[in-house]
Image (spheres, rainbow, N blue to C red):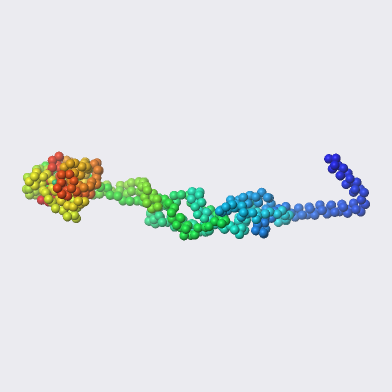
Amino acid sequence: MIVIDKAVKSFIKKINDLSTHSKLVIFAAIVTVIFTLICLLSSGINFSYNVVYGGKVVAQVSDTAVYEQALANAADSIVCDGSSADVLSDAKIKPIITTKNTSSSADELTSIILKNSERVKQGYIVKVDGKDALYLSSCEDVNKALDTRLNMYNKKDKSCESKFANEITVTKAYFDKVSLSTSDEMQSYVNSLDVVTVVTDTESKKIPYDTVVKRSSSKKAGYTLVTTKGVEGVKQLNKQLTLLNGKVTDEKILSEKVVSNPVNEVVVVGTATSSKGSSNKYASSGKFVYPADKNAYLTITSYWGDGRNHKAIDIAGAIGTKIFASLSGTVTYAGYMSDYGYNVVVDHGNGMSTRYAHCSKLYVKSGEKVSAGQTIALMGNTGNSTGPHLHFEVILNGTRVDPAPYLGLY
Ligand SMILES: [Zn+2]
C-alpha cells in the first residue's frame, strides 16, 4: 500500500510539473481512448476465439469450455483402431476481438471439426443389443437390407408382424483407419439375424362325429343299418403362431367358435345268433369300414370258425399295410399280449367293440377317441402268428361274433 501510495504521489507530482499545454494534450488523449472504447463496445465488440483446424479457421467460439467439450465429443464420436486423439491434435484456438457474434455451440463445433477432417469418414454403426456389429458408409443400404430380411417372413395374405429378436440400432459415426463393410457383407450379416414373426390366422377344423351303436335282438348278428348318417361338425379357430426364422415355435389358440355341431351316426346292429355259414339276409353290404387298406394286396386267409374254432377273420397282407377303425369309438386297449401281439381294442358303445391283432405298429393309445376309417395301426406278424396278417374280431357284449357279415363279406 505504501509503495502504491508513493507511486501515485510521484505520478501526481510529475503531472503537476508538466506545462498546461502538456496537461491538455494528455487529457485529450485519455478522453479519445475512453470515447473509442465506448464506441467499440456499443457497436457490439466481442472477445472471442477462432477455432483453427487443418490450418484454416473453421468456427468461432465464445468460451474455451465450448471448444474443450466439442473436442471431447468429437473424440468419442470417432471409431478408430487406436487413439482418436491424434486425429484432433491439429485443432487449436486463437483469441480474437471481433464485432461478429457467430459463436458455435459445442454440438455444432463437434460436427464442424469432424466434417473438416481429411482423415475421418462419415458412416454408420449398426449395433445389435448395444454392441457394435457392423460399420458402413451408407444408411440407405442398411435400412434396405433390414427390410429385405424382415420381409422374408411376412406373408401378404395373413396378418403378421416381423421384428428382429435382438435390438438393432443404426447411429451416425465417424471412422478413422477402420475398414467399412461392403453392401454384400452387410446383407449376409443381416441375413444371419434372427427374426421373430407373429401371425394371427383363422383355421376351420372338423369336429368328428360319434357312432352310436343300437343293438337289436330282433335282427340277426351281422345285420347293420345306418339309420342316421354321421356328419362332421366344423369349428373355426383363431390362432396366434410365433415363428423364429419362419419355423413355428409356439402356437396359441386365441378363440374357438363352433360353426356347426357334429351329428352322431346311429347304427343298428343285429344280435340274434346266426348259425355258422348260413346265408344272412340281414347282412349288410359293408356298413363297417373294411379294417385294412384295400389298396394293398389282401387275401382273407381265414373266416369265422374255419375248422379250428377261429372266432375272427384273418386278412393277410404285407407288413406295414394300414389298419383302419371299422367304426368310431374309444380305444380301450392298445398294447402287447403274447397271443395277439400288438393289438388294439376299440369300444363303439352299447356293448360292441372290435379288436385288431398281430400289428407291427400302433398309432393310438388307450382312452383315445378314433373315428371310422382312421388309421390306428399297421399290419404285422407279432404274437402267435404264422405270417403277416390282421386278426379282426367283432365282440358283442363280451362275446366274439362272426365279423364277416358286418363287413358285407356274406
Ligand atoms: Zn386270426
The residue shown at (50%, 58%) is 181
In the displayed orientation, state which residue is furthest to the front: 82
Quadrant housing the N terminus: top right
Quarter of image, res 343: top left
Q: Work out whether residue 398 can be spotted.
A: yes
Q: Nearer the viewer, residue 20 or 12?
A: 12
Give the number of marks: 0
The residue shown at (18%, 44%) is 341
Q: Is residue 201 left or right of residue 109?
A: left
Residue 122 screen position, x and y as percent: 56, 57
Residue 12 screen position, x and y as percent: 89, 46
Q: Nearer the viewer, residue 135 or 46?
A: 135
Q: Is residue 277 left or right of residue 22?
A: left
Residue 91's place in the image compared with 264, above or below, is: below
The residue shown at (13%, 47%) is 313
Q: Nearer the viewer, residue 1 or 407?
A: 1
The residue shown at (68%, 50%) is 63
Q: Is residue 336 left or right of residue 177?
A: left
Q: Work out whether residue 60 can be spotted.
A: no
Residue 8's place in the image compared with 38, above or below, is: above
Residue 107 screen position, x and y as percent: 61, 52
Residue 80 screen position, x and y as percent: 56, 54
